[in-house]
Each structure stands twice: as structure tokens, then as C-alpha cells.
Amino acid sequence: MGTFCLVLHSHLPWVAHHGRWPVGEEWLYQAWAHSYLRVVDVLRRLATEGRRDLLTLGVTPVLAAQLDDAYCLRGMHDWLGDWLLRAHGAATRHDDPALRRLATAEHRQASAALAEFEAHWRHGASAVLRPLVDGGVVELLGGPATHPFGPLLDERVRAFALQVGLTDAARRLGSRPTGIWAPECGYAPGMEDGYAAAGVGRFLVDGPALRGDTGFAHRVGDTDVVCFGRDLAVTYRVWSPRSGYPGHRDYRDFHTFDHPSGLKPARVTGRDVPPEHKRPYHPEAASAAVHAHAADFVEVVRARLSALAQRHGRPALAVAALDTELFGHWWHEGPAWLEAVLRALPAAGVRTTTLGGALEAGCLAEDADDRVWPPASSWGSGKDWRVWDGTQVAELVADGTEVQRLLLDAVDKGPRTLGRDRELDALASQALLALSSDWAFMVTKDSAPDYARDRAALHAGRVRELAQLLGAGRRGPAQRLAVQWQLQDDVFGHVDARGLRQAAAG
């Protein structure tokens, strides 16, 4: 019938040591508890049944660093314990029987999450993910270090960020990814040449970048690098602002809280229903919706593959790409839906595999005329760069340009030592943090924009301060700052600013 690939993109910016609530580390711990633990549990259980090539999992280097970080691991353990205590407290409240029933179920979930974390995650995510990768259960996608928007980067900085990210994945998981999730699916003509130079063989673009021709993977430009297009007809069936499954009336409402406990006692009920009028959440009704939506998705995939096969005269490909955080964090029932779909698709005759598996199955456009030269694009609003390069974020873009100039100037003018230069490495680390695409996204989408501006300004300010000290030859103060900042932002200990010189020379 055809081939289906599910790609999950897992990403959060570096939040460790940069605030807790309402913005900061709480994001990490919520996503970890409600999405990462639960999605990995689904994958592990399916793997024990002998299932392989389940999906393609992108984990950005900056997220992987936090999921392995000792400080974050301790914080997560504490958070899970607090969740358990909050559920326990809510279960003893006598003023709200519905909340007590919910709290009892939440207590079981918190207990299970704590047991899962203590059994499998205490040594970090790498120890959890590596068996899934080595066992062929998932294909791992890497990416640039701090998830910068590639089209806005100087070519040297872009190559450096990608090398740092790929090296980081190899250190954590034992192998260097051959595929990447380009941050925000951002693409500019010619980026495939940089991917080829870095040993990257495949990446994703959004469907409109291929004018909807997503039924096969395509070689890009004059390279052997392959791009896959996200099939919006399939992807938006799951997550669409207007009609996606998570907005169904019986699913748990993400935005409505019982503020004393922090639990979420309501169902969606209706798009325009205010929180105080939402109906109580009932797990049985939500479970019925999960099964109905899993069956619907299987039919959507089958119909799409059938239409593509008729159009092309041979079995084709459909790629659905979604944020991992959707499954559990934003959509409480998402992991249950995921498991149901991963079981139901093969039973319905649909080959379900990874991006690499799709290539092995012959899902590559074979004719020379099928090479593509995508336009400048992204998966953001308008499918262009406006989210990361629009008028709302003009100041951030200007700061990013300055950060890159200061970094490259400092590296080019710095001493040519045989060993690493701690101060230049710190400068590179702060520059990478300043260039995270998250800050512009949060400003454009009005999602904690003050936090985003403050974080971007903090790291850009550190780049300016350190670059000025290095330019003046004040190595002592520069060294003290580098040590101080490393205590807060020890993201990638292997960042070596000499790689920027190598990129220039190569």
C-alpha cells in the first residue's frame, strides 16, 4: 500500500539555572514527566514485543544536554516528588468529590512516573535512548547545538553549530546521526552543501517547500543529500489549530487548573467555553476518543497513501512530523493515541518505518528530473522566515548578527594556540545560546516574550562583555567570567572555538 513515517521532534531551549516558575525549569520538568517519560515507555514496551523501526526521533542537542545534566536530574526527581505530594493533598479534599477522583488517578500517574524515572532515568536520557537506537527501535535525528535558525547564520557559524551538535550526539549515544531536524525546518538555498560537508544525508522541510510533492524523498540540488517533506494532509489531522484531535471535547483541557493543587480537572468541553464552565474530566470518555481517533488516523493514512499510489503509479510515502511535547504535555492522552496508532497501522497493511527505512524501501524519487531546489522556507507561520526574521524581532535579529560578528572577530584575532582556549570557548557557548531560535519564536508568538527577550539580551550581553575584554588583552577578567558563566551554562563541555577556524580554512 505504501510507507508511513512518524517523526517526533523533541526540543526545549536551555532553561537550567534560568528561572523556575512560571517560565524556566518548570517547562523542562513538565515536558519530561508528561511527554518524554511516557513516550519512551511506549517505545520500550513495543520493543519488548519485538517491534522495530517504529519512528524517527529527533532530540536536539540542547535538550539532550539537559536530560543528562546532574542538576536537572536532581531537579526532575524533586519535581516528581512534589507532583506526588500535590496529588496526595488534593485526594484528601472534601469539598470537591470530582477533584478527589481525579487526584486519585493523578496519584497513580505520579507514582508510576516516579518509579519509571528511578528505574531507568537516574543516569540521564542517553542511557535510556541508546538501547532504542542500537536496537533499531527508533532512528535518531541530530541537529545544530542550540537550535539556531540556520538561514540567518553566517556560514561559518552555521557549520560550527552543526558540528557541535553532531559531535554531542555521538558522545552521548555512540554514533553520529546521519539525519537531522533542521531547526524550525528552516532552509535557505545552498544549505544542502553544508549538510553534505558535515556528513548529513537527510533532513526535513515542510510540505509547501516541495509544493506538496511529499510522496517521495528527493535529492536536493546537486548533492546526494535527501530531503523529506512533511505531509500536511496527514500531519494536520493530528495537530491543527482548527480541527486537530487534541481539541476534542472529551480530552483533558490543558489550560484549566485547580490552582491549589496544580491539577487539571476539566475536559475541553468546547473551543469557546470559559474555564469556569468546562465540564469535569472523565478518563473513560477520553479513552473512547483515543480509540476513535486512532482508527480515524489509520484511515487517513491509508487514504492518503492510496491517493499517492494512484497519482504516481507506485507505492509512495507519507511523513507526519510533530513535536514530541504534544504527546502527554499538551495532549494528555497523546501517548495512548501514539501506542494505538503504532499498533494499528501495521495491522492495517501500512509499512511503518523510519526515514532511513523509507529510503531502504524505495521511497526515493529516482529520476534525475526529480531533484529539488526548495525555496527559502520554514514550518512556521506563512511557511517563510517571518517568525524569526519579521519586524517584531528585528532587534533580536540585529543582535544575532552582531553576536556572530563579535565571535568570528575574536576567533580570527585570537592567539593561535595548540590547545583549547577557555575564554574563546566560553564566548562561543554564549553566542550559541544567544542565537537560539526559541527567543524569536516566543516573541513573535507572544509566548513569554519578556523572558525570551531577557534571555537573548543576557547571552548577547555576555558575548559583548567577553569580546571586549579579549580585544583589550584582559585575559584575567575574561577567565574569571568564563568560569563564572560555565557554572550556570555548562551546556556542551566539548565546545571548541577552534572549530570556527577549521570551518574558515575548510
Image (tube, rainbow, N blue to C red):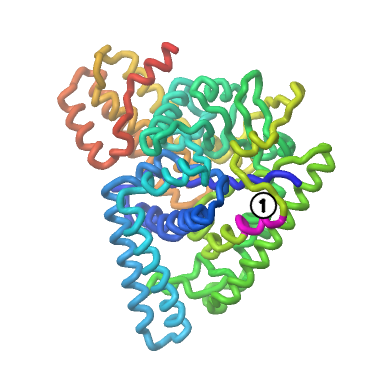
Seen as rendered, the residue at the extreme front is: 50
Can residue 181 be seen at all in this image of the molecule?
Answer: yes
For the residue marked with disc 1, what is the amino acid? Tyr
Instruction: Describe residue 294's horizontal placement relative to residue 56 as left or right.
Output: right
Q: Which residues are magenta?
A: 341-348
Residue 468: x %, y % from top left: 27, 23
Q: Main secondary structure of the magenta part?
A: helix
Residue 80: x %, y % from top left: 34, 63
Q: Residue at x 53, y 25 (%)?
A: 195
Viewer-proximal residue, 489 or 224? 224
Q: Is 355 placed above or below 257 here?
A: above
Q: Residue at x 24, y 37 (%)?
A: 485
Residue 345 located within the stretch drawn in magenta: yes
Q: Is 414 placed above or below 134 here?
A: above
Q: Residue at x 38, y 81 (%)?
A: 91
Residue 5: x %, y % from top left: 63, 45
Viewer-proximal residue, 46 or 198? 46
Quadrant position of the C terminus in the picture: top left
Residue 243: x %, y % from top left: 68, 60
In what element is the residue under mark 1?
A: helix
Counting labels gives 1
Residue 375 located within the stretch drawn in magenta: no
Q: Residues within 10 Å of mark 1 (few under 14, many from 20)?
A: some
Seen as rendered, the residue at the extreme bottom is: 94
Q: Which residue is mark 1?
A: 236
Viewer-proximal residue, 244 or 376? 244
Q: Residue at x 33, y 45 (%)?
A: 68
Instruction: Describe residue 304's horizontal placement relative to residue 396 as left or right.
Output: right
Q: Is 8 placed above or below 31 here?
A: above
Can residue 277 be seen at all in this image of the molecule?
Answer: no
